Image (cartoon, helix red, strand yellow):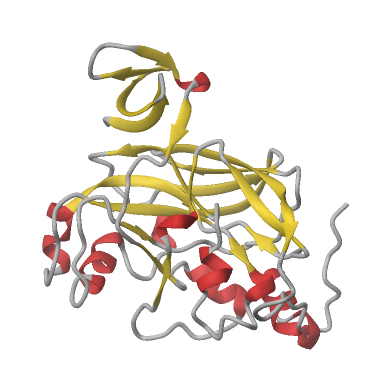
Amino acid sequence: MPEYRRILLDGAAVHVLREGDELVAGDGRRVKAGEAHHLPPVVPSKVIAVHLNHLTRVEEFQIKLAAAPTYFHKPTSSLNSHKGAIVRPQGCEWLNYEGEVAIVIGRTCRNISPAAAAEYIAGYTIANDYGLHDFRDTDAGSMLRVKGSDTLCPLGPGLVTDWDFHDKYLRTYVNGQVVQDGSTSEMEWDMHYLVADIARTITLYPGDVLLSGTPANSRPVQPGDVVEVEVEGLGRLTNHIVTGPAAIRTDVGAQPTRSEEVVSTALGGDWEFRGIRPPKRT
């Protein structure tokens, strides 16, 4: 399956084709994939994410899935890349990973059927839909700062075309240990359905990205952690967590909170009412 990447090569953003361990530019220049400065593989006009889709995630929260998917928006200023740093602002503590498959649109798309959606998909890449749950109370359901803060939307390493999304494993690792182990087979709504659903009222343009949901066991990570998302046939997206150089300003806006909803969501369920003490990192 062809895999295309965007890298910074001699000071310019360049599209390259992966050939084994090398990335090859259109003019013939080659660079080792492990040494390349990666950029997001696409430049979307918008990034739209589904709230809940993997059934293991629904079961984890012990809730009933809605009859149809609901979505939120991640601003393009949140885009990040393979090997990029994920910034947790000072004063925040509930930054969660969410390994996902990202759908990339290839043709302008509006008012299509699920059966026709494949014709409008350029390919797929990996995403980590990080959530800064410290702002969950103040976002009133919009998820704008929770999911849209700077650096919280890494994509990559490449765009893979001709990938069959059926029955593919999805795993997330923190410091080399598996923390999420899911499959596209546990999705309630598949990639074609999601594209057609959004395109009923929102025109999708080439390069636009749809995030298709995460399996169970999204949990907080700490500065210094290395987080990797591996999807069968798409490769492995790697990022590391750092502390931001400045604290959240206190002279404007609502502040990060540590409410029961924030903590229970970050830890994967309602710990207080289950009578379970939240686990401590060691």
Residue 66: x percent and y percent?
Answer: 41, 85
Q: Is residue 168 left or right of residue 279?
A: left
Quadrant of the image occupied by residue 271:
bottom right
Whether residue 109 is visible here, answered yes or no, is yes
- From the viewer's perspective, is 95 left or right of 130? right
Image position of 36 with respect to 95: above or below: above
Q: Along the line of sight, which residue is nearer the eye, 115 or 135? A: 135
Q: Identify the residue at image location x=65%, y=51%.
A: 87
Residue 141, image x and y in percent? 52, 83
Q: Is residue 268 visible in the rendered structure shown here? A: no
Q: How many labels does the image show?
A: 0
Q: Which of 69 and 9 is in front in this view?
A: 9
Q: Which residue is the extreme one toward the front?
A: 251
Task: Name the residue rendered at 70%, 58% in the picture.
Answer: 89
Looking at the picture, how far across and down is residue 14, in whole percent?
32, 28
- Residue 41 position by quadrant: top left
**Position in image of residue 249 (x %, y %):** 71, 69
Look at the image and tell me in which quarter the N terminus lies: top left
Task: State the residue in front, 176 or 32.
Answer: 32
Q: Residue at x 74, y 65 (%)?
A: 92
Q: Residue at x 76, y 83 (%)?
A: 260
Q: In this view, does 24 lie to the left or right of 90?
A: left
In this picture, residue 271 sits left or right of residue 106? right
